[in-house]
Image (cartoon, rainbow, N blue to C red):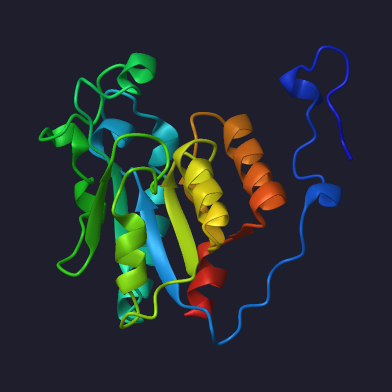
Amino acid sequence: MSRIHGQGSAENLVLYDPSMSVAPHVYDKDRRYAVLVVDMLYDFVYGKIKTDRALPIIPKSGELADAARSADIPVFYPNDSHTRRDFEIQRWGEHAMRGTKGAKVISALRPRKKDVEIPKTTYSSFHDTRLEKELKRADDGKGANTLILAGLHADCCVRHTCADAFFKGYETIVAEDAVNSFTELQYRTGLQYVKFWYLTDVLPTKKIVKLF
């Protein structure tokens, strides 16, 4: 297992060490999928806490959502929707404020009629939201059991959503070309973390859509 030597500089971190990976899951006919497009909002992509690294994942996020819709797989949009009282505002400042353009999904990924937007006030898409209730309604009431994630950020909201999904018994897949973070290091360590601790499969979009 790779380690950070000395004082632990970022340059010494070996990423995607095979010894820290888990074997990919075998997806059988009992998989009931749901797609989550996380925080692809104006403030995250173009606004107050933007990152240019969000731009390349827009087409793949759209491709994933479109493929899901074509296969009658539900698409959810867990989105920051903040008020000034939210604790997270103390960390990031005002962003994605409820009722403002900054809290809207970017036009290129605008939700369709059957898609469901899930307002959230912290990192996890599950924490104090109605996401799990909506997931249980999916697939004619059988409920989704495998969540596919795209969006921002691999080491924050995507990671914390994978965590809560794991605690609640959901399988998770992250679309590696449809998520990103502020830096390459954050992106890669975020993906490694969910692979190792939450048994998340990290796959390219082209492989994920074949599961549908």
* Front residue of 163 and 16: 163
Going 23% across and 61% down the picture, which residue do you hit? 116
Residue at image location 19% in from the left, 33% down from the top: 102
The location of residue 31, given as percent across then percent down, is: 52, 79
In the rendered image, which quarter is residue 13 located in? top right
Residue 59 visible (yes or no): no
**Quadrant of the snapshot with the N terminus:** top right
Q: Is residue 103 left or right of residue 56?
A: left
Residue ranking furthest to the top: 7
Q: Is residue 209 above or below residue 161?
A: below
Q: Residue at x 12, y 32 (%)?
A: 100
Tell me: 142 left or right of 110. right
Nearest the eye: 100 or 178: 100
Image location (x, y in percent) of residue 52: 40, 32
Q: Nearer the viewer, residue 130 or 37?
A: 130
The location of residue 17, given as percent across then percent down, is 82, 45
9 vs 159, left or right, is right
Is residue 174 depicted above or below 143 in this figure? above
93 displayed left or right of 149: left
Instruction: Identify which residue is drawn at 25% across, 20% down.
Output: 94
